[in-house]
Amino acid sequence: MSYKVFIDGSSGTTGLRIADRLAGRPELELLHIAEADRKDVEKRAAVINSADLAFLCLPDAASKEVIPLVKPEVKVLDTSTAFRTAPGWVYGFPELRGQREKIRTANRVAVPGCHASGFIVLARPLVEMGLVPADYPFSCHSLTGYSGGGKKMIAEYEDAARPALYSTPRAYGLTLHHKHLPEMTAVSGLTAAPVFCPIVDDYYSGMEVTVPLRMDLLPGVTPEAVSKALADYYAGEKLFTVHPLGQLPGDGMLAAGALQGTDRIELYATASPDGSQMLLISLFDNLGKGSSGAAVQCMNIMLGLDETAGLE
């Protein structure tokens, strides 16, 4: 069976990556729109409504503009922040318990944000399984390659005349009002948003998210129990590797770009010698499991195809 698929916003970073992953798949027919019509909402909607499934790789406002014109029976995957906590939309993270079946039967799926994915994958299981309370004071640092900022940031970083400080890590979101915070809070089941510091650095893609835990605030919970809980939660997931407690590369360091070009995710957990502190780490590609790879994975589920088809 062949499915008609349209990528609205196919010239952007995420759209281009999705198109690459769909190229050459015989079960998919990619629809296109004339260059002159790319900003005409009525003509975009017409192409979307002729598809079985459409990806919206657009700014929030453009997604919100076109969705009311889309037929209910057309399956939509939106990659913006517009609908990630909206009623009637399913959050597109299949590995969370119960989420895969929701995605399978949904016509409206919101693809998770990259930073949010790295946090939720660590926090959600621990809250869901009762090891960490919903009101725990989470904090999170997330290091990303500059592709996470889209075409504008890519151009800035690859400009020969860029400022010298672009070669150093730069923290942003310093007003503590980052656009990923609502989904990080809601999907993880938290009563308050984590303190979140995103950082962009001078490399193209790859993401490393760190979440510290103070074990004195978690009476009766050990680092071994936390590590085992994460391993049990994601057991059997094809795109996941959960490393044993304390297992690190030979040099004891984790490079944020280690999974560049893949659609996988790896989880690490370390503890202080006395077990009073832990550091949880998720490692993945912000353009892979952090955006386009996650979108294609959800598409496969929604269309009843092999879940990892077209993924790396």
Image (spheres, rainbow, N blue to C red):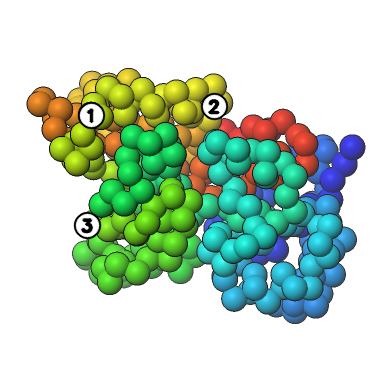
Mark 2 lies on a secondary structure that is loop
Residue in the picture at 64% in, 38% down: 100
Q: Residues within 10 Å of mark 1 (few under 14, many from 20)?
A: few
Tell me which amino acid carries mark 1: Gly
Tell me which amino acid carries mark 3: Thr
Q: Above or below — where is 59 with respect to 20?
A: below
> Residue 113 location, x and y as percent?
49, 55
In-front residue for pair 298/42:
298
Residue in the picture at 35% in, 59% down: 193
Total marks placed:
3
Closer mark to the observer between disc 1 and disc 2: 1
Give whichever of discs 3 and 2 has the lower sequence position: 3
> Residue 311 location, x and y as percent?
61, 35
Give whichever of discs 1 and 2 has the lower sequence position: 1
Q: Residues within 10 Å of mark 2 (few under 14, many from 20)?
A: few
Give whichever of discs 1 and 3 has the lower sequence position: 3
Q: Above or below — where is 307 with respect to 134?
A: above
Label 3 belongs to which residue? Answer: 168
The mark found on residue 220 in the picture is 1
Query: Is residue 182 shown left or right of residue 34?
Result: left
Q: Quadrant where the C terminus lies?
A: top right
Closer mark to the observer between disc 3 and disc 2: 2
Tell me which amino acid carries mark 2: Glu
> Residue 258 location, x and y as percent?
37, 35
Q: Above or below — where is 252 with respect to 45?
A: above
Mark 3 lies on a secondary structure that is loop
Mark 1 lies on a secondary structure that is loop
Label 2 belongs to which residue? Answer: 237
Query: Is residue 46 shown left or right of residue 104?
Result: right
Q: Quadrant where the N terminus lies?
A: top right
